[in-house]
Amino acid sequence: MDELEVQRDTQKGKYVTFKSGNEYFGLKIQYVNEIIGYQEITAIPESEEYIKGLINLRGKIIPVIDVRLRFKQDPFEYTDRTCIIVINVNQLVVGLIVEKIAEVVEIQEENILPAPTIGKADKSQNKYVYGIGKVGDQVKLLLDPDRLLNDDEKIALEQITDEEEGEE
């Protein structure tokens, strides 16, 4: 087994969990590049409300999304507990602003249930959730990071970050 396979194997079933509103969400650890503290964000004019802008992370320009606004939850005041989870989804690096990181948990395949499809729930975050992870007596909503941005937004953000990096 090469080093990459060993790394994938140790990450299998591991999720970074974070709080947004009253719910806890899980994100497969393989998508997570790093977790950083909140930092100054440069706004992008005329972008969606939940796309907060761009950050400069060691010379790389990264778009950041406010997860609560994306899920149509009430906005929250950024504090010293606010974090940015830097993820890599299909070669696009994006920062997710979250209220606070909870923990890294292991969720076995048999403890993951499909996302509920009960009627037409008004919870818009359900379209970003691919499953429900049971951790002890708690439940974590498991996110599909690929669904957080639609294709048009991905293209626009790629163009913006390319332009910003080209200016340096």
Image (tube, grey):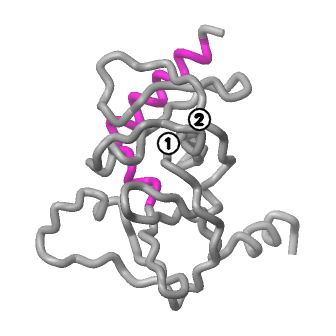
Q: Is residue 92 left or right of residue 43?
A: right
- Mark number for residue 97? 1
- Where is 119 relative to 90, above or below? below
Q: Is residue 1 above or below residue 49?
A: below
Task: Verify CB contact (< 8 Å) between mark 1 and mark 2.
Answer: yes
Q: Say whether residue 45 is magenta.
A: no
Q: Secondary structure at mark 1?
A: strand
Res. 47 image quadrant:
top left
Q: Which portion, as a residue range, is magenta?
A: 144-166
Position of residue 101 measured from the top left corner of the image (x, y, whole percent) = 58, 55
Residue matched to label 2 = 38
Work out which quarter of the rendered image holds the C terminus and state it: top right
* Residue sitting nearer the eye, 4 or 134: 134
Mark 1 vs mark 2: which is more N-terminal? 2
Label at residue 162? none
Q: What secondary structure is found at the residue carrying circle 2?
A: loop
Identity of the residue drawn at 87% across and 65% down: 3
At label 1, counting other C-alpha atoms closer than 10 Å, the crowd grade (few under 14, some 14-19, many 20 or more) is many
Q: Position of residue 141 (x, y in %)?
A: 42, 69
Whether residue 142 sits left or right of residue 4 in the image: it is: left
Asked if residue 1 lies left or right of residue 156, the reply is right
Image quadrant where residue 84 sits: top right
- Percent of width and height locating residue 140: 46, 72
Disc 2 residue type?
Tyr
